[in-house]
């Protein structure tokens, strides 16, 4: 039996632990499977004081709960995938699988500081992502990567394997492995560097990113025979549902704004204004069609490999439930996420690098991206003209509100970025 | 990994914290433009149900049926009524629901079949054959005369003469619904096969219709007999042995003291409806007196840990007044059924909103009380937007009109011609689809629908409402219905004012001295609880839910 308090302490102090604002009542190992002599995968149920719970994946060895730090343990996971092993737990089992030929790993390197997962890079050839928060059902990342890999979509890091828990407690994806893109820099870092260095060429690559995004969306809605990857007409109430969802999100965030954060001042007490803005944006308009989307699309989810963009991380927003993340949505929701992150980059350049972005940087970034996107996306997926602009704005608003909540919970120092974004949105004109 | 059932964490008690939503398939959404709702239509509306926060959809009977009792007259247990689609459509619906985290249970009538069922036809024609003993036949129509007639408006007796067989057959409901003979082991085996068939297709459980009447015995009223409980226990054993996280929900319109028997020792039905609490909620509203609710909850025995009450305000049937005294029934008729057309059998065939004169405060208060009581709430389709009824339609059709999705043609329910619709949608100026519909209410932040959505979300954040203890507070002011629910470290105080006027109340909260009540919707902190009685003032038909928080805080 594990000591409850040390387990709680370990989990709640991890970066990937998602409920930092909630009070934990207990932590229990609900199933465990021995992977090697001294390596165990554990499903840990963390219960909150109100009696709800979340489940986390912990890899434990003789030294504690941080077994992934030992590269021998990380290599063991990869070996199990290569061997396609199934290992019994107390109730369920852990199944490992690989796609194509995967060579034996030599060097494993843990990447620190990720938001909701832990990743290990093998020989600069493969990267294993260990999901920490475990939910019943197939993880969207496995689902989308598998589909895009099989469809031959070039701008991803192809799926190479995965492991999952089955039976007993639930069926859930525990980790996925994909091609590692070496010597690549993520879009976020490139954007900050480009702003700081006055690099104009970067904006051209954003047009390319728009093209890649358009192609990705066309692919995700391209299989009429597969219920998961066919584009669907929206029902009559879909715009209403979207409005209600975003409106309630706004209401909820504004209800719980902490009093003691001065960075919130520009938007404090302006919740009703934000909601009014939403109503103006959704009073009329179309929604186009819905498809499976990336779900958490921003510059940080892209890599520039020297020639082209690679899209990463199809998990969806970590704070949302799995059924929510698997929902088909308008592809414009991804577009809005990316546009929002241009604004984020412009603000962050000033905050982090002390270099204010040129006044027109964000607008030019948006224009380039959208031009590329419009050139390649299947136009039947998105509404046309002003309806597209309005729907985009709705999603941008949703994103900013989501970011605000996320930063409040996870990175208080960053709160002012979504705050500035929201305040600016309130000053803009409504597209007609 | 995409087979049904793989989208949920194992949670044998999921039903205790679930919000149920009762759907009349025919009335919900027409997916093939033929004027009648169907599985394809319902599948199209799953995003809406997911948004609303529904955990489990309860489907009214969808089996082939001559539809002389809304489908409760089943003519084939193994198929889907062609109006609703195919078994494949059903399977697809269940899978899509599961992928959205929504479970599905369905009505199953164990007590009887339609007279059209091949078993009954065989039983009539060939008394010596395989099905000869599948129903309850007798030469004498006076036997078991202690058993009451339930549908008093249409049925003179529980026996009906069949000229073909030359015998009377027994039926506790309509004469076109002969009762199955559970003394026949073949009947028992056949019904267990039926359960397994649907569970194997991914169904998460059953609402067992009319469950108290399975057996008949001399000298009894034929309700709640030990043999009935024994058979239900056999069903439960069968389900537990072969399936995970399924639920049996008993419809036993009986007094709580009798209904608890349907839970057994946690080895019979998982859930049962609490019928008597519902009319008393309506009574409390009219009398502006919380006592009827407090009393009935006091008379409700404890139930096993692994069991749960199903609570509802309205459903597809008449608002049943079987579980009230004659005097109370007269009162209810006088207050809620002023037009004789509103009465049906021992009940009132109206929807929630018209019963409450479309009063928004009243509708919200009733939902708040429902959601705060120990049990799982069961919503009835359309009540979330405040749909009305049509008392000029026959039987219970008046509360089964098409779901009102939009202000467009046919209320957005169907693209068929108006004449083709199974029933006309409501078009009156107050409750008609142009005034009351989902689309409009989604866009209005203060609509009933949006409010209810928040209420559901709040309830789901606090398992205490489904799992917690219940303790009534008895303040001096009789117009206040107040209680405390506790589960693990979560303590919730619910205070409701059933009066039409503002009220003040002093509550003895001394046990929670030092706690801070935090209002749960707006997260407003109220003054700390001290030694003295805690004073609250409530708006007319207003309510407060507080989380009692330990920390001293700011």
Image (spheres, coloured by chain):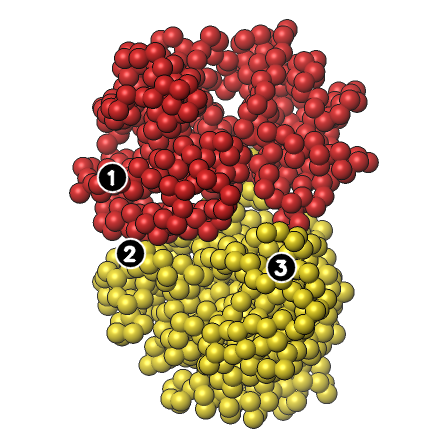
Chain colours: A red, B yellow
Q: Residue at x 55, y 81 (%)?
A: B479
Residues at marks 1 and 2, CA–CA distance in whole angstroms:
43 Å
Q: Residue at x 24, y 60 (%)?
A: B408
Q: Which mark is residue A428?
A: 1
Q: Position of residue B390 (x, y in %)?
A: 34, 77
Displayed quadrant of residue A154: top left
Q: Secondary structure at mark 3?
A: strand
Considering the image in quadrants, where does the N terminus of chain A appear? top right
Q: Are marks 1 and 2 on the same chain?
A: no
Q: Which residue is mark 2?
A: B33
Q: Position of residue A140 (x, y in %)?
A: 49, 32
Q: Foreground mark, 3 or 2?
A: 3
Q: Is residue B11 visible?
A: no
Q: Residue at x 43, y 72 (%)?
A: B361
Q: Which mark is residue B516?
A: 3
Q: Secondary structure at mark 1?
A: loop
């Amino acid at each position: 039996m594990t000591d409850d308090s040390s387990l709680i302490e370990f989990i709640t102090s991890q970066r990937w632990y998602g409920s930092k604002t909630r009070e934990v009542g207990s932590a229990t190992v609900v199933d465990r499977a021995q992977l090697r002599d001294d390596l165990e995968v554990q499903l840990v149920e963390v219960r909150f004081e109100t009696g709800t719970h979340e489940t986390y994946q912990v890899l434990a060895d003789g030294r504690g709960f941080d077994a992934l730090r030992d590269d021998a343990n990380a290599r063991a996971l990869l070996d199990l995938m290569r061997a396609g092993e199934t290992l019994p737990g107390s109730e369920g089992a852990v199944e490992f699988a690989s796609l194509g030929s995967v060579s034996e790993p030599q060097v494993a390197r843990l990447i620190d500081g990720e938001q909701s997962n832990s990743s290990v890079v093998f020989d600069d050839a493969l990267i294993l992502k260990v999901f920490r928060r475990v939910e019943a059902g197939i993880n969207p990342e496995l689902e989308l990567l598998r589909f895009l890999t099989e469809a031959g979509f070039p701008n991803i890091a192809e799926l190479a394997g995965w492991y999952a828990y089955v039976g007993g407690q639930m069926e859930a994806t525990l980790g996925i492995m994909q091609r590692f893109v070496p010597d690549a820099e993520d879009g976020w870092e490139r954007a900050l560097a480009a702003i700081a260095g006055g690099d104009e060429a970067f904006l051209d690559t954003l047009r390319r990113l728009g093209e890649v995004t358009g192609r990705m969306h066309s692919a995700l809605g391209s299989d009429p025979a597969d219920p998961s990857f066919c584009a669907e007409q929206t029902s009559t109430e879909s715009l209403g549902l979207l409005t209600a969802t975003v409106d309630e999100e706004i209401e909820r965030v504004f209800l719980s704004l902490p009093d003691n954060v001065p960075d919130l001042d520009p938007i404090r007490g302006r919740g009703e204004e934000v909601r009014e803005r939403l109503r103006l944006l959704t009073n009329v308009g179309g929604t186009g069609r819905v498809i499976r989307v990336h779900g958490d699309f921003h510059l940080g989810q892209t890599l520039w490999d020297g020639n082209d963009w690679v899209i990463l991380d199809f998990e969806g927003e970590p704070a949302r439930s799995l059924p929510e993340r698997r929902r088909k949505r308008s592809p414009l929701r991804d577009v809005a996420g990316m546009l929002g992150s241009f604004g984020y980059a412009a603000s962050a350049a000033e905050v982090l690098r002390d270099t204010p972005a040129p006044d027109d940087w964000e607008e030019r970034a948006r224009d380039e991206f959208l031009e590329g996107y419009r050139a390649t996306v299947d136009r039947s997926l998105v509404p046309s003209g002003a309806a597209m602009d309005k729907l985009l704005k709705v999603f941008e608003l949703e994103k900013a509100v989501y970011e605000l909540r996320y930063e409040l919970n996870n990175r208080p120092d960053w709160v002012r970025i979504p705050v500035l974004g929201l305040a600016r949105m309130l000053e803009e004109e409504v597209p007609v | 990994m995409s087979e049904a059932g793989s989208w949920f964490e194992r949670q044998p008690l999921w039903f205790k914290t679930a919000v149920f939503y009762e759907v009349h398939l025919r009335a919900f959404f027409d997916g093939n433009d033929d004027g009648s709702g169907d599985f394809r239509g319902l599948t199209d509306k799953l995003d809406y149900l997911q948004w609303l926060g529904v955990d489990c959809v309860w489907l009214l009977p969808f089996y082939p049926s001559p539809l002389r009792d809304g489908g409760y007259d089943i003519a084939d247990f193994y198929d889907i009524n062609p109006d609703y689609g195919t078994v494949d459509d059903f399977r697809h619906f269940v899978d899509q629901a599961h992928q959205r985290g929504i479970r599905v249970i369905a009505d199953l009538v164990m007590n009887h079949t339609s007279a059209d069922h091949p078993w009954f036809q065989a039983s009539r024609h060939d008394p010596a054959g395989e099905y000869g003993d599948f129903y309850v036949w007798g030469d004498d129509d006076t036997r078991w005369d202690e058993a009451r007639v339930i549908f008093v408006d249409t049925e003179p007796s529980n026996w009906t003469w069949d000229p073909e067989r030359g015998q009377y057959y027994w039926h506790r409901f309509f004469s076109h619904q002969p009762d199955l003979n559970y003394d026949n082991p073949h009947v028992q085996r056949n019904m267990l096969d039926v359960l397994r068939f649907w569970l194997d297709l991914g169904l998460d459980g059953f609402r067992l219709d009319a469950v108290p009447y399975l057996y008949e015995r001399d000298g009894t009223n034929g309700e709640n007999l030990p043999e009935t409980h024994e058979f239900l226990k056999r069903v439960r054993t069968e389900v537990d042995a072969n399936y995970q996280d399924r639920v049996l929900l008993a419809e036993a319109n009986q007094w709580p003291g009798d209904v608890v028997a349907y839970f057994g020792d946690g080895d019979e039905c998982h859930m049962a409806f609490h019928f008597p609490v519902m009319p008393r909620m309506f009574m409390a509203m009219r009398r502006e007196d919380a006592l009827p609710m407090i009393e009935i909850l006091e008379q409700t025995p404890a139930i096993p840990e692994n069991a749960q009450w199903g609570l509802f305000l309205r459903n597809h049937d008449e608002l049943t007044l079987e579980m009230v005294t004659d005097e109370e029934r007269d009162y209810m008729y006088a207050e809620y059924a002023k037009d004789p057309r509103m009465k049906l059998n021992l009940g009132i065939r109206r929807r929630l909103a018209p019963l409450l004169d479309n009063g928004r405060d009243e509708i919200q208060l009733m939902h708040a009380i429902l959601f705060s009581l120990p049990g799982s709430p069961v919503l009835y389709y359309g009540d979330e937007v405040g749909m009305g009824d049509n008392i000029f339609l026959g039987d219970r059709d008046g509360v089964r009109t098409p779901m009102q999705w939009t202000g467009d043609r046919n209320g957005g329910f169907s693209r068929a011609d108006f004449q083709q619709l199974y029933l006309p949608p409501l078009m009156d100026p107050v409750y008609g689809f142009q005034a009351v519909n989902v689309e409009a209410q989604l866009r209005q932040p203060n609509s009933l629908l949006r409010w209810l959505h928040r209420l559901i979300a709040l309830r789901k954040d606090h398992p205490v409402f489904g799992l917690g203890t219940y303790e009534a507070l008895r303040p001096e002011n009789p117009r206040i219905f107040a209680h405390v629910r506790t589960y693990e470290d979560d303590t919730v105080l619910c205070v409701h004012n059933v009066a039409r006027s503002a009220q003040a109340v002093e509550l003895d909260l001394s046990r929670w001295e030092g706690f801070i009540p935090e209002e749960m919707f707006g997260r407003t902190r109220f003054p700390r609880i001290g030694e003295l009685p805690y004073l609250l003032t409530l708006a007319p038909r207003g309510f407060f839910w507080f989380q009692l928080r330990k920390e001293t805080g700011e």
